[in-house]
Amino acid sequence: MIRASATSRPAPQQRYSGVAWIGRDVTTLEPSRLSTFHAQFNPGARTAWHRYPYGRVLHVLHGTGRVQRRGGPVHEVKAGDTIVVAPGEWHWHGAAPTTFVALVSTSETDPDGPGTEWGAPVTDREYAHPPQSTAIRLPDQDRVPSRDPCW
């Protein structure tokens, strides 16, 4: 067991618009490269455009948020939703205009490789696009069967 840190810090304003708090939960022991973070966004707060070299999985814990791939529509996300960000995919994510959102973010890291690449802030005009609430559902035959936990 690795005891998670209970601390969060304000998100850096050069990479976030509005008030957001972030914290590192777990960086696993080698040879694993798995890393987990948590974030809470106040209403209207969001990241700048960014991308991850190995992709990332975002899971919404509570609230309502927004996420967008570069060139795609804005999507509304809610508690229980999971967003899979492909390696190298430019995107942003944050809270809806009138609600908080909290996320857990999991990704692979490479201490000797590139980290997150940050781009321009998401403009108010980009953020204000009406969101779609449609989710992508995988057909049952494409789902990976779960494994019994090893603990």
Image (tube, rainbow, N blue to C red):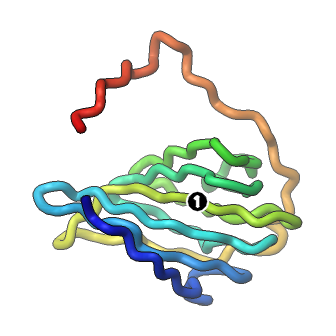
Closer-to-camera residue (120/107):
107
The quadrant where residue 18 appears: bottom right
State the SS at label 1. strand
Residue 101 location (% of width, % of height) = 70, 62
- Which of the image's four quarters has the C terminus? top left
- Residue at the spot 70% in from the left edge and 82% down from the top edge: 19
Residue 145 x %, y %:
37, 19
In the rendering, at what x and y percent does residue 150 appear? 22, 34
Q: Position of residue 88 (x, y in %)?
A: 42, 56
Specify the amino acid type for callout 1. Answer: Leu
Extreme-left residue of the structure = 31
Residue at horizontal 11 percent and vertical 56 percent from the top: 31
> Height in image: 112 above or below 77?
below
Most foreground residue, 56 or 79: 79
| On screen, residue 50 above or below 121 | above
Residue corresponding to mark 1: 103
Front residue of this view, candidates 123 and 33: 33
Q: Is residue 133 above or below residue 20?
A: above
Residue at point 76% right, 66% down? 100
Q: Is residue 73 above or below residue 5?
A: above
- The front one of 150 and 129 is 150
Quadrant of the image for the N terminus? bottom left
